Image (spheres, rainbow, N blue to C red):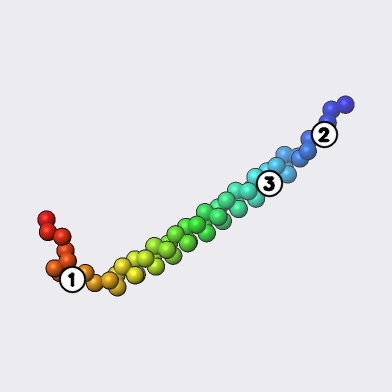
Amino acid sequence: MKPEPLTTKEELSQNISQILSEQEKAELDFEFYLNELEEFFMNDFKETEIPEDDHPIY
């Protein structure tokens, strides 16, 4: 007696689509937070003034 497959091709396809969409959501969330961090630190840096005599001499 041959065992039945645990999932059909359609179910596998749906599972793969769900996994991929969850991965895409995670990547979008990561990109969003990365942009937020970059903006936060760049704004902080922009507000910092460096006096002229503190520049390195080349």
For residue 10, what is the image quadrant? Answer: top right
Q: Is residue 19 left or right of residue 5?
A: left
Q: Where residue 36 sits in the image (x, y, percent)?
A: 44, 65
Q: Earlier in the sequence, mark 1 or mark 2?
A: 2
The secondary structure type at the circle numbered 1 is loop
Q: Is residue 23 left or right of residue 40?
A: right
Residue at point 21%, 69% (across, down)? 50
Residue placed under numbered mark 1 in the picture: 51
- In this view, the residue farthest toward the left is 58
Q: Nearer the viewer, residue 25 or 13?
A: 25
CB contact under 8 Å: marks 3 and 2? no
Circle 1 residues within 10 Å: few <14, some 14–19, many ≥20: few
Disc 1 from disc 2: Cα separation: 75 Å
Quadrant position of the N terminus in the picture: top right
Q: Where residue 20 sits in the image (x, y, percent)?
A: 60, 48
Residue at point 57%, 51% (across, down)? 23
Residue placed under numbered mark 3 in the picture: 15
Q: Where residue 22 sits in the image (x, y, percent)?
A: 60, 53
Q: What amino acid type is highlighted by mark number 3? A: Asn
| Residue 21 badge | none
Q: What amino acid type is highlighted by mark number 1? A: Pro
Q: Nearer the viewer, residue 58 or 29?
A: 58
Residue placed under numbered mark 2 in the picture: 4
Residue at point 47%, 62% (across, down)? 33
